[in-house]
Amino acid sequence: MRKAALVWFLAILALSGCASVTLKPVDFSWSYESVLTADSAGYVRAEPKTIAFNAGELFRAETKDPAAAAGTIVRIIRDYEGYYFITAPGFRHVYIFNGASGKLTLKKKVLIAEQGMVKPFFNRRDLGIELVANGQVYLLNRKGIVAGEKK
Amino acid sequence: MKKLRGLLTVLVLLLLQVGGAFAQSSDYEIIDSFKKRHQSLLESIKSVQDLGQRDILANEIGRLEDEYEQHRKLLGEGLYPESFEASIVRLRDQLKNSTERLLLAEESRKDKVKIVEITGKVDAAGKKIVEITAQNEEYRAAIDRLSRDVQEQSARIQQLSVENAALQENIRALQLESRKDKESIAKLRELTDKLYANIRDREELIVKMMDSLFDEYSKADLTDAQKKNILAIAQKNDYVSKIVTTIDGNINYVGTALLTPQDVNVIRDQQKRLAIKWDGIKPFVSKLYPDEQSRARDISMVDGRLSDLKNGTGEATWRSIQQVFTANGVAIEPFRNAGEFSSRVLAYIDEQLKNPSREKYQVFRHKIWDSPIKDQWLPVIPLDELTEKQRADIEERVALWDRKISAAFSRWVVIGVFAAAILALVAVMIRKKKKPTLPA
């Protein structure tokens, strides 16, 4: 009985150790955005340590033409929490994705400019992700625009 | 808490709005432009060509550092694992390396220039050596030729001197015989002409020798050694002695010869030429003497000989003029200069005026005075020697003699006519007396 009790005690200790290991806090943010050029199939890939994915769906959503992705620059940045912020010149929106299990899942689609953005870019800031587009500065987080106004 | 976050957000946005040139720049582009400028600078630094460019690039590095200083942290992340500072240091290190390379290249270039310069100098020196060698060869050949010429001239001068001595001996012997036959006079004249020709030849040779040595010596590019060689040749050939001998020959000649007016002109020209030549070569001749005493002695000797020659030529001229009187049997007191000539001629005419002789007048007037004295000799006598007044005095006296002779002649003509008339009258009377009377 005492022996069995010891075994159970050790098993409980071992199981509880495995399940509760959490590393935090984690800063997933990128210091600065990645500027990637989509290939003819809509794939964007570049330097190591930068994600690669097919941006065709985004172009389809923005322009109704996934082929429009070819040769277009796509700007990506990751915030502190690990969300991906993606946009491109001519887009009306910034797309906020959660990345996990080999896929990007749209978390938020933020309308920035109905007429589309000219030369948009991201910067990482302490309070979130800064977007500059059409001469306007916005501060974004996973929920959308925190500061600045859409046009 | 939310208010605070909002306030901070506004502040951040305000800062972003007024943040200067980079305020609305993409961090990515800041990093990218920095990388590009950094890379461009790095390449420029590697290929920098001179120190001027180096200075410009050093300024560019400073400017890059100043401009991007505010993004040090961002660039630290963007340039990871290199930092902003390290990237600037890398530029400066590279610039330092390039500067060293430039300095080395500059040094090398200077060395090359120096090598080219030295090579050029060596080439020039080589050419100069070849040139000098050729000049030396030429000079040696010229010296040999000069030496040979001078020796030949010297030998010929010697030969002429011997011939002249023999000729002078013969002339003296003939003069002592005092023979007045045409053959003896012709022989004397022949010997004198030959002697004179020899003297002139010898003089020509001496002048040629003077010219050869002096011209060679006067060349500007001669070295001291080469000049010494020429002096040695002159010394070896007894240069000064030959000049003295030649002048002595002339002095002896004019001391014994009877000259024509043409001879006087030629001798005077030669004498002047010799004097000018001598003045020209005196500096050269001075160098032939190791000591001042013998130099002064010999130079004053030649000066004295030239002066003697001038005086001798004058005396020979007057002696030759006197010979004109002697040859025509006119007994006139000897004269050796213009003053004596004038007074002796006037004395002679005055003596003749006391007892004028038509025959003596005719000889004096036509064979002596009118020609050759007046028309040949007087033109070669300078006016400062025999003045216009002296000439006019003689002319006046000759004219007086002429008038006296003419008057005497007229008197004799009248007497003759008178005598002839008387004789004719006597003859007529005698014929009348002897005429027979016819019977009535």
Image (cartoon, coloured by chain):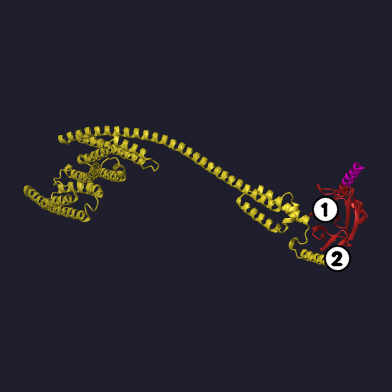
In reply to whether residue B214 is colored magenta, the answer given is: no
Q: Position of residue B287 (x, y in %)?
A: 30, 42
Q: Where is residue A124 in the image (x, y as percent from the top left)?
A: 80, 57
What's the colour of chain B in the image?
yellow
Front residue of this view, candidates A133 and B148: A133
Q: Position of residue B343 (x, y in %)?
A: 15, 52
Q: How far apart are marks 2 and 1 (CA)?
A: 33 Å
Which chain is rendered red in the image? A
What main secondary structure does the magenta stretch of the protein show?
helix
Picture residue at 39% right of the left edge, 35% below the top: B142
**Label 1 lies in what chain?**
A
Other-residue count near label 2 (Cα within 10 Å), few / some / many at <14 / 14–19 / ≥20: few
Which range of residues does the magenta coloring cover?
A1-15
Which one is closest to the eye, mark 2 or mark 1?
Answer: 1
Residue type beneath disc 1:
Lys
Q: Name the residue under label 1.
A: A24
Q: Position of residue A55 (x, y in %)?
A: 89, 51
Q: Is residue B277 visible?
A: no
Disc 2 element: loop
Residue B189 image label: none
Front residue of this view, candidates B118 and B319: B118
Labels 2 & 1 near each other (Cβ < 8 A): no
Disc 1 element: loop
In the image, residue B17 above or below residue A22: below
Picture residue at 40% right of the left edge, 36% below the top: B139
Q: Mark 2 points at which residue?
A: A149
Front residue of this view, candidates B246 and B226: B226
Q: Quadrant of residue B403?
A: bottom left
In the image, residue A140 above or below residue B89: below
In reply to whether residue A13 is colored magenta, the answer given is: yes
In the rendered structure, the answer to whether residue B158 lies left or right of residue B325 reads right
